[in-house]
Image (spheres, rainbow, N blue to C red):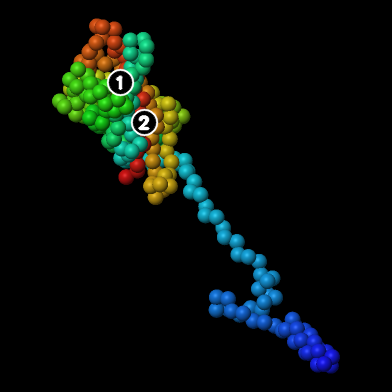
Amino acid sequence: MNSKLLATAAITALLATQFANAELVISQNGETQKVGEAAAQPAAVTKAPKTAKVEKVKPSNSTSYKLDPNHANVRFAIDHFGTTTNQGGFYGVTGDLNYNPAKNTGSINVDIPVNSLDTGNEHFTNHLKSAEFFNAEKYPTANFKSTKFHFKNGKVTKVDGNLTLLGKTNPVSLKATKFNCYNSPMLKNAQVCGGDFETTIDRTKWGMDTYVKMGFAKDVKLNIQVEAVQQ
C-alpha cells in the first residue's frame, strides 16, 4: 500500500515539473506566443484624441463673408422712467461683409427682422411690435448699411453707416469693442470674422416718439454682435 502511494506521488511530481518547464503556445489575433512572452508584453496604450484648437488668423485680402444668423443679433436697452431698464433684442440677423484689413477697408450690409423682436415677456414684446413703436407689420425689416470702416493698427475701431427703421434713414456710428478673425473647428476650419459693436441712438429721429412727452426716454443703447463666415 505504501509503495503504491509513493509511486503515485513520484509520478505526480514528475508531471508537474514537466508541465512547468513546457513552452505552452497560445493564439492571439492569429499569432502564436509563448505564455511567458505574452506576460512580458506591455499593455497597449491608447492615445487620447487631440482637442481641436481655435486658431486666430489674419484674414485673406478682399474676402467676402456671409453673416451667420446664429451668431448675429441686435440688442437694445432703454431707461424706464428712471427706475428699471427695458431690454430686448432682434435675432436671426442676416447680411454680407466685405473685409480687407491690408487696405484698411470694409463694408457691411445687414438686414434685421423686426418680427424676431423678443423681450422675454409676450405682452411687452407684442406692444413693441405694434404701431406705437416698431410697427412690425408695416416695416418688417430694418437695415444697416455701412459707409466707412475705421481702423487703428490693423484693427477695426468703428463703423459708420446708415440705419433705416420705420421707413426713415439716419446716420449712425458703431464703436467696435472687439473684432477678430479665426478658423472655426465647427465649420470645417472655415474662416470667421466678427465682433461686438455698440452705439446710442435717439429714437425720435426715426419717428418713434411714443411717451416721450410723458418722460419716457428717447435715447436707446444698442449692442450688436456679428460673426460672418468666409465664402
Disc 2 and disc 1: Cα gap in Å?
16 Å
Disc 2, disc 1: CB below 8 Å? no
Q: Position of residue 148 (x, y in %)?
A: 32, 27
Q: Kindly tell me whether residue 220 is visible in this rendering.
A: yes
- Name the quarter where the N terminus is drawn: bottom right
As drawn, the label of residue 18 is none
Q: Is residue 139 left or right of residue 37?
A: left
Classify residue 93 by image quadrant: top left
Kindly identify the amino acid type of the residue bearing the numbered disc 1. Val
Q: Nearer the viewer, residue 187 or 151?
A: 187
Residue 75 versus residue 230 in the image, above or below: above
Q: Position of residue 36 (x, y in %)?
A: 70, 75
Q: Is residue 113 left or right of residue 191?
A: left
Q: What residue is shown at x 39% (from left), y 50% (from top)?
A: 188
Q: What residue is shown at x 23% (from left), y 24% (from top)?
A: 126
At label 1, counting other C-alpha atoms closer than 10 Å, the crowd grade (few under 14, some 14-19, many 20 or more) is: some
- Name the quarter where the C terminus is drawn: top left
Q: Is residue 168 left or right of residue 84?
A: left
Residue 80 versus residue 7 in the image, above or below: above
Q: What residue is shown at x 63% (from left), y 65% (from top)?
A: 43
Kindly identify the amino acid type of the residue bearing the numbered disc 2. Gln
At label 2, counting other C-alpha atoms closer than 10 Å, the crowd grade (few under 14, some 14-19, many 20 or more) is: some
Question: Which residue carries the number 1 mark?
Answer: 172
Q: Position of residue 213 (x, y in %)?
A: 24, 6
Question: Which residue carries the number 2 mark?
Answer: 225
Q: What residue is shown at x 42% (from left), y 44% (from top)?
A: 184
Q: Nearer the viewer, residue 141 or 101?
A: 141
